[in-house]
Amino acid sequence: MGGKRSKAESEETPLAVADDENPNNKKRKILPSLIKNKEKRSAVHAKLKHDKKIEKKKKAKLRDAAHKRALELGEEPPPKKIPRTIENAREFDETVCKPDDEELFAGNDADEFSSVLKRESTPKILITTCRFNSTRGPAFIEELLSVIPNAHYYKRGTYDLKKIVEYANKKEFTSMIVVHTNRREPDALLIINLPDGPTAHFKLSKLVLRRDIKNHGNPTSHMPELVLNNFTTRLGHRVGRMIQSLFPQDPNFRGRRVVTFHNQRDFIFFRHHRYIFEGKESKKPDPKNKLAKSVKNSKGEKVSQENVIARLQECGPRFTLNGFISRTWTLAAGDFSYDLFGCGVEVHLVKGATLITYIHHLWLLPSESLIELLRHGAWASYTSVLGYPTWSFVRDETE
C-alpha cells in the first residue's frame, strides 16, 4: 500500500480501457490522452498523426484513379466534394449586387464619387488628427502619406472639425481623413467625402507599422494599383467606391506596387505590397502556368520547364478596419426610421419636419462623425437615459 505503480501496470490501463470500449476490435487502440508518460504519449500521438496522413494520401490516390478511369471510359467523373467552410455555410444575402443590376450602375453615374472615378477630377486628400494626438499617430500618418498619392497632412491644433471641413472645401480637397487616437494608439479612421458627404467611421485595429514588419520594402512614388475584394453587397459596393475615390485611376504598372483592401465578414484587411516576376526551372511541367517556357538542351530536346512565379514584398503599414458607418446626412422626401448597423444610432426622418438622432454608447461614434448634421444647422442637446449618454440632434425644416 502506498507504493509506486510499476511501469507495466501504468501502461496496461489505457489498453484495458480501450478494450472495454471496443471489445470487438482485434487490434487494440491506444488513446494518447490516457497515457501518463509524456514521451510515450508524444510518440503515440505522432504515430497516429502519421497513419492519418498516409490514409489521407491513399484516399486521394483512389479518387484520382477513379477520375482518370472515368475519363478513359468516357463516363462522367464522380462529383468533387466541397469542404464545408464559414464562407460557403453563410446564408444567402439578398443585398448582394448582381452583374445585371441596371439600377445599381445607373446610381453609380450620379453618386458623389463619379467625378473622381470618371477621371473628371484628380483626388486630393487632406489628412489630420484628433485634438489629443499621440507619438504613434504621426508615424502612422507618415506611412499613409506614402500609400495615398496626392495626400497632404495638416496639424489639427485647436480648430474644430467644422472649420477644417470649410477650409478643405475652399482648397478643393475631394476627401478628408481624420486619424483618431486613444491611449496613445490610433484606434479609428474617419473618412469624409467632400463637399456633400457621405461620412464613414471605421474602427482601426491590429496596426503594424513598416518598421515592425520583417524584411519589409520601401514604397516608390509610382501610382499604385488598387485591389478591392468581396465588396459585393450594396453597402459594400458604396464603401468600395468611397475607398476607390481616394486613389488616382491611372496606376503605373512599371512600379509593381499594389494596395489591397480585402473585405471578409465585414472586416476590411489592408495590405501594401510590391511584386516581381521571376523564372524558376522545374522538371515537372505546370499546365496551369501560361507564362511558362520550355528549356531545351544543345540537341533540341526538352529538358525542363521555366515556370514564371510572382514574389511579394510587403511595404506596410498593415491594419484592419471594421464597424464602418456610412451615411449622407441630408433630408429627403418620405417618412422612415432605421438603425445604423446595430450601433445604437436611431434616425427618424419625417417629411419636411424634423430629423432626430439618438446615440447610445457615445464612445462608439465620435462627435466628428456627425459633421454633416452640424453643417446643415442642426442643434444638439445632451441628456442621460437610464445612465447611458444620449445626444439628440434636431433640425426643423418647416422654418
Image (cartoon, rainbow, N blue to C red):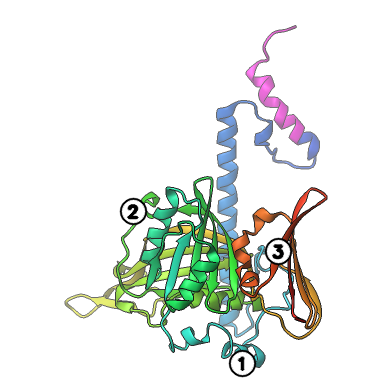
Q: Nearer the viewer, residue 380 or 230?
A: 380
Give the CA separation, mark 1 to mark 2: 45 Å
- 10 Å crowding of disc 2: few (<14), some (14-19), many (20+): few
Q: Which residues are magenta?
A: 1-18
Q: Which residue is mark 2?
A: 215
Q: Residue at left 35%, top 68%?
A: 275
Q: Which residue is mark 1?
A: 106
Give yes or no for residue 91 being in the magenta stretch: no
Give the CA separation, mark 1 to mark 3: 36 Å
What kind of residue is marked 3? Ala
Q: Indicate whether 288 appears above or below 16.
A: below
| Helix, strand or loop status at disc 3 | strand
Q: Nearer the viewer, mark 1 or mark 3?
A: 3
What kind of residue is marked 1? Ala
Q: Which residue is mark 3?
A: 380
- The spot of residue 265 in percent (x, y) is 64, 64
Q: Quadrant of residue 77?
A: bottom right
